[in-house]
C-alpha cells in the first residue's frame, strides 16, 4: 500500500541520482550516502546547472543583440511584415535561435544562397522541478519562428525565405537591392498549394510585367524569354494538376453486404448473386 509506494518512489529517485552521477563523470557510481542526501545534492546540482545555463544564454542573447545592425533590421522588418509579428518579437526569436550564425554566413561574400525561416506550431516542453518526473514535462504546441536549413524539419505552417542575387558581401547600404524576400503559406503541410499560389499569383505576374531583362535588350519579345515564361507556366500547371489529383483521390464507399449474402446457401446461389 502506502509503504510500498514510498519505497518504490525512493528507489526511483535513487536510481535517477545514480544516473545523473554517471552522466556527469562518465562512469557508473555507487551511492554511499543515504538516498535523501544524494537526491538533495542532485537537485542542488541541477538547479545550479540550470541557473548557469540560463546565465550563459542571457549573455549570448545580449551579445547577439549587440550585433543587430541595419542588415539584420532589414531582415527583421521583412519577416515582421510578412508573418504578422512585431519587430521586437522577430528580433527576440532570432537572437534566441541556435542557428543564429547562419545569418552572418548569409551576409558574407559568396555566402549562403538562401536563408529560411519557418513559422509554425512547435512542441514546447516546460519542466517543473516541483513535480514528480512523470508529471514534470508539460507538452504544449506553440507558434514559433525559427531559422532552418529546410532539410530537418517538416513544413506545416509558413515558410519565409531570403535569396541572394549575387555573391557580393551584404551591407547595410545594399541589403534591399541584393536580397530578395518571399513567403508562402504551407498550412497543414499543403506545400503544393503554397508553392502554386506563390508562383501563379506573385512570381509569374512579376516576371511578365518586368521590363528590364539585363543583357537581353528585346525583353519580353525575345524568344528565349518567351520560352522561359512558357516553361514556368507549364510547371505551375503541373503543380496544379498534381494538387488536384491528390485532393480528388478516389474514396470507395463502404457498402453493407450482409443483406446480400445472408441468404446464400449453395454454389448456385453464389453464381446467381454474381
Image (cartoon, rainbow, N blue to C red):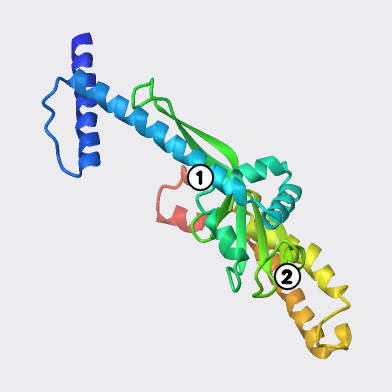
State the quadrant of the N terminus: top left
Return the x and y of residue 172 as percentages of the image width and height.
72, 61
Residue placed most toward the observer, 160 or 273: 160
Q: Secondary structure at mark 1?
A: helix
Residue 85 vs residue 212: left or right? Answer: left
Secondary element type, mark 2: helix
Can I make out residue 255 in this image? no
- The image's mark for residue 60 is 1
The mark nearer the N terminus, 2 or 1, is 1
Q: Is residue 129 above or below residue 160?
A: above
Q: Residues within 10 Å of mark 2 (few under 14, many from 20)?
A: many
- Labelled pair 2, 1 in contact (Cβ < 8 Å): no
Q: Which mark is residue 236?
A: 2
Q: Position of residue 46 (x, y in %)?
A: 33, 30
The quadrant where residue 40 appears: top left
CA–CA distance between discs 2 and 1? 44 Å
Whether residue 235 is visible here, answered yes or no, is yes
Query: Height in image: 227 above or below 154?
Result: below
The front one of 45 and 229 is: 45
Q: How would you rate the neighbour count of disc 1 (Cα within 10 Å): few for under 14, some for 14-19, many for 20 or more?
A: some
**Is residue 21 found left or right of 166 in the rendered image?**
left
Q: Position of residue 68 (x, y in %)?
A: 64, 51
Task: Give me the residue at 50% from left, 41% from top.
Answer: 59
The label on residue 106 is: none
Give how far across and how far down residue 96 sits, in percent.
Answer: 55, 44
Amino acid at each position: 500500500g502506502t509503504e510500498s509506494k514510498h519505497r518504490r518512489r525512493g528507489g526511483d529517485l535513487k536510481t535517477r541520482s545514480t544516473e545523473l552521477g554517471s552522466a556527469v563523470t562518465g562512469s557508473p557510481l555507487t551511492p554511499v550516502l543515504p538516498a535523501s542526501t544524494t537526491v538533495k545534492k542532485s537537485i542542488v546540482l541541477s538547479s545550479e546547472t540550470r541557473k548557469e545555463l540560463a546565465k550563459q544564454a542571457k549573455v549570448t542573447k545580449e551579445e547577439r543583440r549587440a550585433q543587430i545592425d541595419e542588415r539584420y533590421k532589414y531582415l527583421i522588418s521583412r519577416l515582421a511584415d510578412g508573418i504578422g509579428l512585431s519587430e521586437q518579437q522577430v528580433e527576440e526569436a532570432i537572437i534566441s535561435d541556435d542557428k543564429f550564425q547562419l545569418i552572418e554566413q548569409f551576409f558574407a561574400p559568396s555566402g549562403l544562397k538562401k536563408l529560411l525561416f519557418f513559422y509554425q506550431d512547435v512542441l514546447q516542453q516546460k519542466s517543473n522541478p516541483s513535480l514528480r518526473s512523470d508529471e514534470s514535462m508539460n507538452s504544449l504546441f506553440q507558434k514559433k519562428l525559427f531559422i532552418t536549413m529546410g532539410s530537418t524539419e517538416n513544413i506545416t505552417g509558413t515558410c519565409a525565405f531570403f535569396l541572394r542575387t549575387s555573391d557580393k558581401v551584404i551591407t547595410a547600404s545594399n541589403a534591399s537591392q541584393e536580397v530578395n524576400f518571399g513567403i508562402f503559406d504551407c498550412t497543414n503541410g499543403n506545400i503544393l498549394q503554397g508553392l502554386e499560389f506563390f508562383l501563379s499569383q506573385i512570381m509569374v505576374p512579376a516576371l511578365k510585367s518586368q521590363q528590364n531583362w539585363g543583357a537581353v535588350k528585346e525583353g519580353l519579345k525575345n524568344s528565349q524569354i518567351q520560352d522561359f515564361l512558357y516553361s514556368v507556366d507549364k510547371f505551375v500547371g503541373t503543380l496544379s494538376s498534381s494538387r488536384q489529383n491528390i485532393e480528388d483521390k478516389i474514396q470507395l464507399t463502404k457498402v453493407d453486404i450482409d443483406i446480400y449474402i445472408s441468404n446464400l446457401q449453395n454454389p448456385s446461389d453464389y453464381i446467381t448473386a454474381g
